Image (cartoon, rainbow, N blue to C red):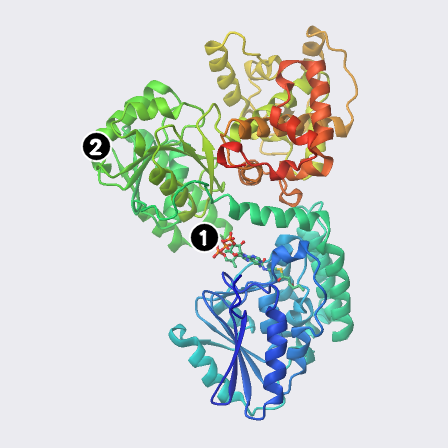
Amino acid sequence: MNDKPVVRYDVENGIAVITIDNPPVNALGPGVTEGIVESLEKGEADPNVKAFVMIGAGRSFIAGADIRGFDKSRPPPKRRSYELLDEVNKPVVAAIHGYALGGGLEHALSCHYRIAVADAKVGLPEVLIGILPGGGGTQRLPRLIGPKAALDMIVTGRHVPAPEAKELGIIDDIVDGADLRGAAIAYAKRIADARPLPRVSAREDKLAEAKADPGMFDAMRKSIARKARGQKAPYHCIAAVEAATKLPFAEGIAEERRLFLELVSSDEAKALRYAFFAEREIARIPGLPKDLKLPEVKTMAVVGAGTMGGGIAMSFADAGVPVKLLDASKEVLERGLQRIRDNYAVSVKRGSLTQEQMDERLALITPVETYEEIGDSDAVIEAVFEQMPVKKEVFQKLDAVMKPEALLFTNTSALDIDQIAAVTKRPEMVAGTHYFVPANVMKLFEVVNASKTAPTTLAAAMKLGRDINKISAYAGNCDGFAANRSRIPFALEQNLMIEEGTLPEQVDKVMVDFGYPVGPFAVADMSGLDISYDTRKRRKAADPNYRMLTIPDRLVEMGRKGLKTSAGWYDYEPGDRTPRPSEVVKEIIREESEKLGNKPRAFTDEEILHRLLFGSINEFCKILEEGKAIRASDLDVMWLHGFGFPRWRGGLMFWGDTIGAREIYNQIAAWHQQYGRHWKPSALLRETAERDGKLSEIRSKAFGG
Ligand code: 3H9
């Protein structure tokens, strides 16, 4: 047990310095707010103290309340530090470096002055974990910077860089980062005698903005309606800020508290907290030595300038990493580069990128036509055609030209990486780095550990993903790896239910109501039905028992390839992406289900939802059983960042726990009897059901579970 105090108090030349020292991020865990209160009381009572400085030790000011604490019951504090800060009669200066987030910024807002170093960030990101700022942030921030700017910060949860925070009026001064403590003490001395104390809670001037524009709150509700569908927290955030403009400060605080308490133990907040920690846990691979010396990856090469290769090159350029893009065909290379330019140009047009940033990123991508030119890169990702002989040829060439310490990665989504690695003399330096489409946008970066991959290669690949702001996720080498493999049952059920007579629009509506941004049939139309058609044909050629899907096959064969042909599962008007239910498709479904001997029947929404999701829960368990993933929560994160699973539902396994492993197992066992082999229950699922365990807490036995 570490009994180092989490809050230190010392007095220097009449200035009491309150230092929060609760690693890693100075969250407001047990003892912290109590320590702040105690220090303020001590300084108030000491006639030698003229002013206070509040500062964080280590890498940050305060990153907010301790998120783990929301699931534990803690007795309410005798005095709330936010309130005491408002009451003290000596000025308090918040000295911010690193992050001042959530309760951290709320403490700073309760102080009388705020100074920050230039690279500090401030924000109220509570909405991202399903709650609202409950330490007075919804009442003080609008008073300090106006309700409009406060709404923007509180409803998006975005981190605001210190220079912008100064412009907004959150920060009084930007100071040199070399000696923040010294600068803060000097600042405190300067303002020590200034009266009255500038208390944010006492300000009313900025609130006038809401009187001039009373419609801003409804406008905000309207603007978030699509994105915030199914969620409560963003709306409660708006309500709390609105209260700030209508109620006296103390009543506004009471209303904030009431709304906060409604959210903090909601399913939405629990799910978002789960996702927050799952996203951090996924970086850990049990058994990997902590002191591994990783090869540095500072320059990259990508082989293949198709859509995928181009997206991969962009993912590096976006992170400031120089990347060579290799394609033997000049034409493909130029087309690839043009696609990259066009993609960046769209971002510039939308305003998410400046022309200067676009130029900088393009300058980081160097097109090359020969393997020799990439030989000195620290690592290479192959993104060529998905055919084993082609991949093998590429890897033989890479092995010959790449410097001996270079890492060789493949972006294959389905092929056996052991076979690819076997053609090289360095299979220990080969791993999979599987991107999701579009590669420059999707956050998931699946790192596939082949049988000979060395721990350093694996760890370097995981780090590479994080370095380019992706979420690296471990997967074992098997058909489809972890993410795509776990989604196969979903895609299969989607089609089988159609054969039983349900319609694409019905399935899509259920999934959109569940929280997906778009239903699976509309997504299939966007991706192009011909892609899965080609995969099915390939699989059938390799395995005569492979079950073909006649309905989507017929659609492709009659030219209905999706959005690009203005017809797929849905009809589309030219130039319009709105899916419209199709009579043609309805008729094909009727004919094909009749041929299969299926009598059309009505599906309930619940049956559709469970048929789509239970199969993947079963597959998650099989993947974990085989040691091809580490934890259930990793697979949940993969679905959040690879397949658009609604974040406020936590993840597939977390959602499964709201139903219960036992009920899911029983249903799967019943469908196994009814539909056959593809519903065979996983032994791990059965075992979890029998002991009433939690699906989201399953950890593969191969990794010590
Ligand atoms: C709040 O403040 C409510 C208030 O309104 C008051 C209500 C009354 N709690 O992310 P990292 C851990 S709600 C507990 O890898 P980075 C994290 O789990 C809160 N733990 O580092 C990890 O642990 P481990 C509002 C926390 O540098 C380690 O710290 N605040 C918390 O990439 C390092 O984290 C937020 O929502 C926490 N609050 O990013 C901010 N924060 O090593 C949440 C971090 O065991 N935090 N940990 O895996 C963040 O956004 C990022 O952690 C931050 C640093 C940007 C600060």
- Residue 165 visible in the snapshot: yes
Horizontal and vertical percent position of residue 33: 62, 70
In the image, 402 versus 48, the foreground residue is 48
| Residue 182 appears left or right of 167 | left
Q: Quadrant of the C terminus?
A: top right
Residue drawn at x 61%, y 24% is 683
Looking at this rendering, what residue extends furthest in the front direction?
1
Secondary structure under tag 2 reads helix
Label of residue 76 in the image: none
Q: In which of the image's four quarters is ligand 1 placed?
A: bottom right
Q: Position of residue 97 (x, y in %)?
A: 47, 69
Q: Is residue 220 above or below residue 364?
A: below
In the visual, does 506 lie left or right of 362?
right
Query: What amino acid is labelled 1 in the image?
Result: Leu
Task: Kindly report the distance in space between the C-alpha atoms of the residues bearing marks 2 and 1.
Answer: 36 Å
Within 10 Å of the Cα at label 1, are there few (<14), some (14-19), or many (20+) other Cα atoms?
some
Is label 2 or label 1 in front? 2
Residue position marked by numbered label 2 in the rendering: 401
Name the spot of residue 616 as percent of width and height, x first. Answer: 61, 28
Pointer 1 residue: 353
Q: Earlier in the sequence, mark 2 or mark 1?
A: 1
Q: Is mark 2 within 8 Å of ligand 1?
A: no
Place residue 30 in its image quadrant: bottom right
Residue 698 lies, in percent from the top left, at 59, 36
- Three-letter amino acid code at the position of disc 2: Val
Eyeballing the image, is 446 above or below 279? above
